[in-house]
Image (cartoon, rainbow, N blue to C red):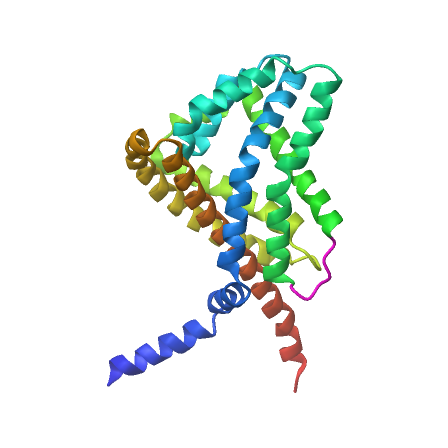
Amino acid sequence: MLVPRYARIIWHTARNSSLWQAYQYFAQRDGALYAAAIAYAAVLSLGPFLLALAMLGGLLLRDYVAPATIIDWVTTQLPQTVALTPVLTSILERQAEASNGLLALGSLLLTLWAASLLGTTLRRALHAITAPTLPRAPLRERLIGLSATLVALFTAILWLGSLGLVGGLLVQLPFLWRSVIGLATSWLVFAALYTFLLPGPRVPSPAIAWSSLLAAVCWEVTKAVLASFALGLGRSSEVYGLLGALVALLFAAHVAAMITLYGAAVAITLAERGSAEPKRRREP
């Protein structure tokens, strides 16, 4: 008799938890569908993002960053893109030959606008999951997506400007330290996303911190699993070619988007519970 009783207690506690309420937000507001939209936007924005990275890197670093360096960085961060290396390398090499002049400037602006599709889609998805009743502002969302793209580009340029020196030092560290540093980096990235991209009133810092930590842990575990699968997919890409690489990239992007949107739902849930707690205390 004790086992069913404890099972009911555990089930009741789980249903009243913030994680379950956040899951209800995520499911009822079509989180998986918006995650799929983010995944497709990520794949479509990858090419323009790399072109913008090559052009801005050439302008700011004066040929210090070669196309091969950019490709190595991308394949390191996204193992699913290894099969795309020949195509991406040829595109970036041709773009590097036309990195000056008015035509290059126009190409850069158009490329930035196309690359901002990911940031815009992410902002709209966060709006639909966390604040569906707020009115939309398409132009503002596009500008926010463009700003997020610029921040990501300059961050990547700073990393490439150091030739990945920090990354080279991290590889030599023990596995435990590399895992801790990777978790801290992911935590900061999710915290920045939730701080600057969530619509509506500003979410309290504790809610941002805990939801970002949850998303970071989920992503680090998922990334380790996907990296192990990427080795097997790398062998299958010899058969399926670009199709296998695109499917693997879409799957990884979809999982990352689901983690991001669920973490945002957790942040909103924690914020709502935090604001409701003082009201309960004031009630007689």
| Residue 135 part of the magenta segment | yes
Q: Position of residue 120 (x, y in %)?
A: 64, 46
Q: Position of residue 186 (x, y in %)?
A: 50, 42
Foreground residue, 128 or 179?
128
Quadrant of image for the N terminus: bottom left
- Say which residue appears at 58% left-offset and 48% top-offset: 191
Q: Position of residue 165 (x, y in %)?
A: 49, 21
Quadrant of image for the C terminus: bottom right
Foreground residue, 17 or 135?
135
User: How many numbered discs, if any?
Assistant: 0
Q: Is residue 180 above or below residue 128?
A: above
Q: Position of residue 148 (x, y in %)?
A: 65, 40
| Residue 71 part of the magenta segment | no
- Say which residue appears at 46% left-offset and 26% top-offset: 167
- Residue 236 found in image quarter: top left
- Say which residue appears at 54% left-offset and 20% top-offset: 92
The boundaries of the magenta stretch are 132-137
Q: Taking 222 as reference, is 193 left or right?
A: right
Chief secondary structure of the magenta portion: loop
- Residue 82 found in image quarter: top left
Asked whether residue 26 is in view, the answer is yes
- Residue 56 found in image quarter: top right
Foreground residue, 176 or 158?
158
Foreground residue, 187 or 229?
229
Asked whether residue 165 is in view, the answer is no
- Say which residue appears at 65% left-offset and 62% top-offset: 131
